[in-house]
Image (cartoon, grey):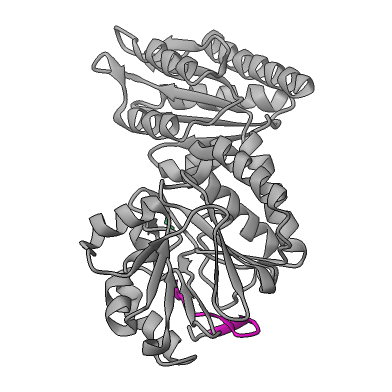
């Protein structure tokens, strides 16, 4: 893609990664992604963020459409994760910048990643600002949203907030603005991104949203480092979505995910789903053999109840369930009703183990169901009842919240 002017003399010069399906090595990105970088023409020409090293040629090419790379005076590194800083060594060589602005943790990370002992790094802190001529850049450290080095840059005169990973989405497109694409698909990708990347830092997210409010920055455009740029009503829309995401209030939806050996646990999953639906709760059933853990996580995030099924295997849970539970635990979802279920042949430990793990996540637990070998008609009835009980518990929780 070519450089694109998003505001007068502010150019998107990033890269579109149409084929990226495995984001950061652990989460699927079915719509691809972009690495956004922004070049401001001013007395001190300033590049905010770079791209993954695979796209350093694209970045230099896009910068060249606006100015000679050697004319870039300043570089701002909002975040050192390699999808945004991978091109830095090549950029520093090509631009020979006077200064590279980063957070205190960013300085450490840049040195650790790139051995950059002689780069002109200048640490900036929350509340500090730098004049680049007719514009002033203001910095806000956003530690652990989502890395220790993360920060945002606000360009006051342009009412532009360059927000690093926050408010981003994995969404490759020829368009640059959020209002130019399908809104339902866009918001699915915003939610999916939050669920798989930002979720553990929800309390930090709330604090930072509060801090931005106190700063009274006038923002009419939010430019994240991935995906589409928010403008107009989209600015309020994505901030409101992040507030809702971070609070994780329960909603009347459930996800039933499971792994099965001889389809006994699968039968139980379907009976539980019937019970949930009968009880008035929308439900999605996901087999861990068919659905990637990041797809399941996106559904967990959008659900108020989580039901986890595993057959017992070698005195424990099946490997896909173990992996899913580890992944979910790390992302720290909150405010869920939960239950376990599963079949077993002789020892049957899986139900207890999954129940303990869900309890440790501080979910509101409903007693689970297990069945020996193949669930009987009565056991399947118990599964339907389990679904109904979870639906009732969830709806009571929603009413009380
Ligand atoms: Fe998009 Fe945290 O890197």
Residue 18 in view in this figure: no
* Residue 107 image point, x, y percent: 34, 57
Provide residue 57's location: percent of width, then percent of height: 33, 82
In this rendering, the answer to whether 13 lies above or below 161 is below
Q: Judge whether residue 314 can be spotted in this image.
A: yes
Q: Nearer the viewer, residue 148 or 397?
A: 148
Identify the residue shown where x is 39% and y is 69%.
100
On screen, 134 above or below 209?
below
Q: Is residue 160 magenta?
A: no
Question: Residue 390, how many percent across, how many down?
Answer: 64, 18
Query: Which quadrant of the figure shows ligand 1?
Result: bottom left
Question: Relative to 336, does residue 233 appear above or below in the rendering?
Answer: below
Q: Quadrant of residue 35?
A: bottom left
Residue at left offset 24%, top offset 64%? 116
Q: Which residues are magenta?
A: 4-17
Q: Quadrant of residue 400?
A: top right
């Amino acid at each position: 893609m070519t450089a694109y002017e998003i505001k007068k003399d502010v150019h998107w010069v990033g890269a579109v990664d149409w084929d990226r399906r495995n984001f950061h090595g652990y989460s699927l990105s079915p719509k691809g992604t972009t690495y956004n970088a922004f070049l401001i023409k001013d007395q001190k020409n300033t590049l905010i963020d770079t791209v993954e090293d695979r796209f350093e040629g694209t970045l230099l090419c896009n910068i060249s459409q606006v100015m000679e790379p050697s004319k870039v005076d300043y570089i701002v590194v909002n975040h050192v994760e390699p999808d945004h800083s991978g091109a830095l060594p090549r950029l520093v060589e090509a631009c020979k910048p006077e200064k590279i602005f980063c957070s205190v943790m960013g300085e450490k990370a840049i040195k650790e990643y790139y051995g950059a002992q002689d780069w002109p790094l200048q640490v900036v802190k929350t509340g500090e600002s730098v004049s680049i001529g007719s514009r002033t850049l203001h910095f806000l450290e956003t530690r652990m949203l989502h890395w220790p080095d993360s920060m945002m840059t606000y360009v006051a005169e342009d009412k532009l907030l360059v927000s690093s990973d926050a408010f981003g989405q994995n969404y490759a497109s020829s368009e640059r603005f959020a209002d130019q694409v399908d809104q339902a698909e866009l918001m699915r990708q915003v939610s999916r991104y939050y669920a798989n990347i930002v979720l553990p830092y929800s309390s930090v997210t709330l604090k930072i949203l509060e801090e931005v409010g106190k700063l009274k920055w006038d923002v009419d455009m939010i430019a994240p480092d991935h995906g589409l740029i928010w403008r107009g009503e989209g600015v309020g829309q994505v901030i409101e979505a992040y507030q809702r995401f971070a609070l994780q209030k329960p909603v009347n939806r459930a996800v039933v995910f499971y792994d099965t050996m001889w389809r006994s646990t699968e039968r139980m999953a379907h009976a539980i789903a019937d019970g949930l639906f009968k009880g008035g709760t929308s439900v999605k059933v996901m087999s861990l053999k068919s659905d990637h853990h990041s797809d399941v996580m996106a559904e967990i995030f959008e659900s108020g109840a989580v039901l986890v099924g595993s057959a017992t295997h070698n005195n424990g849970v099946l490997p896909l369930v173990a992996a899913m539970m580890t992944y979910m635990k790390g992302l720290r979802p909150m405010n869920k009703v939960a239950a376990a279920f599963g079949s077993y042949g002789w020892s049957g430990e899986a139900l207890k183990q999954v129940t303990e793990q869900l309890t440790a996540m501080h979910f509101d637990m409903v007693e689970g169901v297990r069945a020996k070998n193949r669930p009987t008609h009565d056991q399947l009835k118990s599964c339907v009842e389990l679904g109904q009980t979870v639906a009732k518990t969830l709806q009571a929780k929603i009413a009380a919240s």
